[in-house]
Amino acid sequence: MLALVPFFVPALIDKKMNTVVQAAPYKVSNQTKSLYDSLDFIGDLHSDVLLWKRDILIEHDHGHEDLPRMLQANIALQAFTIVNKTPVGINFDRNTGDTDQITRLFMAQGRPLKSWFSLTERVIEQADSLNEFSYRSNGQLSVIKTKGDLKAYLKRRQADKNITAGFLGIEGAQALEGKLENIDVVFNAGIRMIGLTHFFDNELGASAHGVSHAGITEFGRQAVKKMEDLNILVDLSHASPKLIDDVLSIAQKPVIVSHTGVKGTCNNVRNLSDEHLIGIAKTGGLVGIAMFDQAVCGSDASAIAKAIQYTINLIGSRHVALGSDFDGAIKAIIEVRGLPLIVEELLKLEISTEDIRAVMGDNMKMFLLQNLPN
């Protein structure tokens, strides 16, 4: 019986941790459906689905996305972000890096032994899994690493909408294990975006949910420079306010916030202030609006739409995108097939069709065409 634990326990945890408020099927007006179906490019900046060792080539009745559901939702590009360490008793207010839940999860999943004890190896293991899914997908799932990859994929997609793509990010740069050379290691594994912090302070700087509430460290400054040199996107999700200030003061390239809410509609430690939204936009950056209660202070798509509207009004539509946090151990408002509900709510708010197209994916496409490595 013990031999069955790796097969059943992780799946049960996945089902328990990744739930939805409003499940499929989703119904929208004919106007909304027509607009949604006409969207040339739909993209999302944050999904943690690789953590769960779920076969994403198969449609599941739990969780928030997989390849069949992404295709049904006409997703053109998904950022697959790699969780590598989370503390026991995780919360929004105060966490340390003294404990770790992912070690036990990886053991139960039967992941390679080296990934049990190395955060960098956990990144490589999950990156390899996306490449394996791509190989097994018979061309339906591409992995994007360069501007050339993206251009070639976009050309393919003009003729075949029944394909999708992803690029890789890291959630929490503790995965570098305090070594600058590991930036090269993860870059070579395909990583193109790195979140500096997650739920606890690390070698690069302070988390919004950590203990010190400090800013960037000297190692963090060196790491940001090296990331920019390699055209790895700097992701400020979960960063402390002081860390955001420090990065904005040194950034030479656009920064990104892959999944967040905004204090203007949901005032908590997780979300971005107006000052930080403006600062991120000044770098030419992009802000992904998340899709769960603690990010938007609501339990339906209208709360997501209001956060998008607020951000558009403050910094302009070209700096706003989707950043769902699908399969991030959250109770998401919708799963991926529910994205038309956001379009419907944006129409109710009288957001223009042009701005809706931008937020739903065009901004993400242009940002990556400009900022991925050559």
Image (spheres, rainbow, N blue to C red):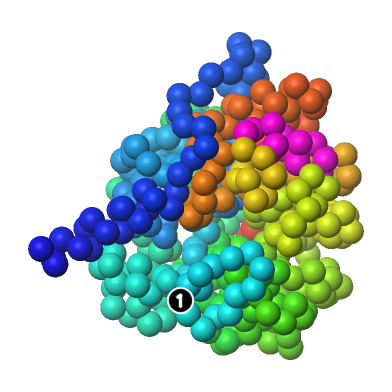
Query: Can residue 193 be seen by looking at this rendering?
Result: yes
Of residues 192 and 243, the one drawn nearer to the viewer in this rendering: 243
- Which segment did they paint magenta? 300-312
Asked whether, in this view, residue 192 is left or right of residue 243, the answer is left
Of residues 331 and 219, the one drawn nearer to the viewer in this rendering: 331
State the image coordinates of residue 173 (x, y, percent, origin top left): 59, 74
Task: Report how many numbered discs are placed on residues in the image.
Answer: 1
Residue at 45 percent of width and 24 percent of height:
25
Residue at 74 percent of width and 88 percent of height:
218
Occupied quadrant, residue 234: bottom right
State yes or no: residue 9 in magenta: no
State the image coordinates of residue 153 (x, y, percent, origin top left): 52, 42
Above or below, 281 relative to 205: above
Query: Can residue 153 be seen by looking at this rendering?
Result: no
**Residue, disc 1:** 100
Residue at 58 percent of width and 18 percent of height:
28
Occupied quadrant, residue 180: bottom right
State yes or no: residue 307 in magenta: yes
Q: The residue under label 1 is which amino acid type? A: Asp
State the image coordinates of residue 187 (x, y, percent, origin top left): 54, 70
Residue at 10 percent of width and 63 percent of height:
1
